[in-house]
Amino acid sequence: FMEQERIPYPEIIFSADELEVVEEVFNAYVRVLEDGSRPGLKTAQIFELWSDLPSVAEQTTVTDQQVMIERIQQVDTDGSGHVDFDEFMQLMRIYRVEQVERIRHKELRNAKTAGYTRREVHELRQVFDMFDEDSKG
């Protein structure tokens, strides 16, 4: 029913308010070097920052942390060992996509138990999303 099938979801975007909060928290963790440069965040700083963001859950298990480290390496496209703000936003987008996919999988499992088809669930999700203007449920 759900194995290895990607679930459709609306394009993942961040509201202006979300971007403002993320940027504020990110900037609080970035060190400014003597030369005025801002190299970005190292992995340990990202874990600290992650727990300060209201829109994401803390990574608590070893598996969660390993996945996060893999994602950090994935977004550190210049290989600097530091994640700048643009790379961090890529990390946030990956997290948001995975979060939405987990929710959709759970919805489909529950809907299957209730006797709904995949198409019915998709149609209900479209109607729900149309009225969920602030994306808060």
Image (cartoon, helix red, strand yellow):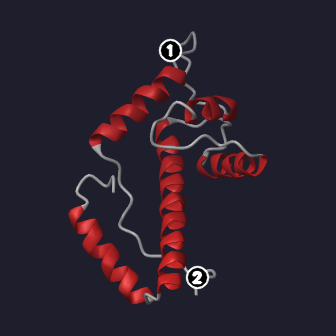
Q: Which residue is drawn at the image coordinates 52% and 30% (left, top)?
A: 52
Q: In the picture shown, does residue 72 fall above or below 4?
A: above
For residue 78, above or below residue 113: above
In the rendering, which numbered label is found on residue 2? Answer: 2
Q: Position of residue 38 (x, y in %)?
A: 53, 23
The residues tagged by marks 1 and 2 sit, at their Cα atoms, a distance apart of: 50 Å
Judge from the rendering whether residue 114 lies leftward or rightward of residue 16; answer left or right: right
Q: In this image, 26 relative to 44: left or right?
A: left
Q: Residue at x 60, y 40 (%)?
A: 58
For the point 39% across and 59% down, the residue is 12
- Pointer 1: what residue? 36
Q: Identify which amino acid the numbered label 2 is placed on.
A: Met
Decide: is 50 above or below 105: above
Dot 1: few (<14), some (14–19), or many (≥20) neighbours within 10 Å?
few
Quadrant in which the C terminus is drawn: bottom left
Name which quarter of the figure residue 129 lies in: bottom left
In front of the other: 123 or 27: 123
Front-most of residues 122 and 22: 122
- At mark 1, the secondary structure is loop
| Secondary structure under the numbered disc 2 in the rendered image | loop
Residue 63 image point, x, y percent: 76, 52
Locate residue 98, reporting x and y percent.
54, 60
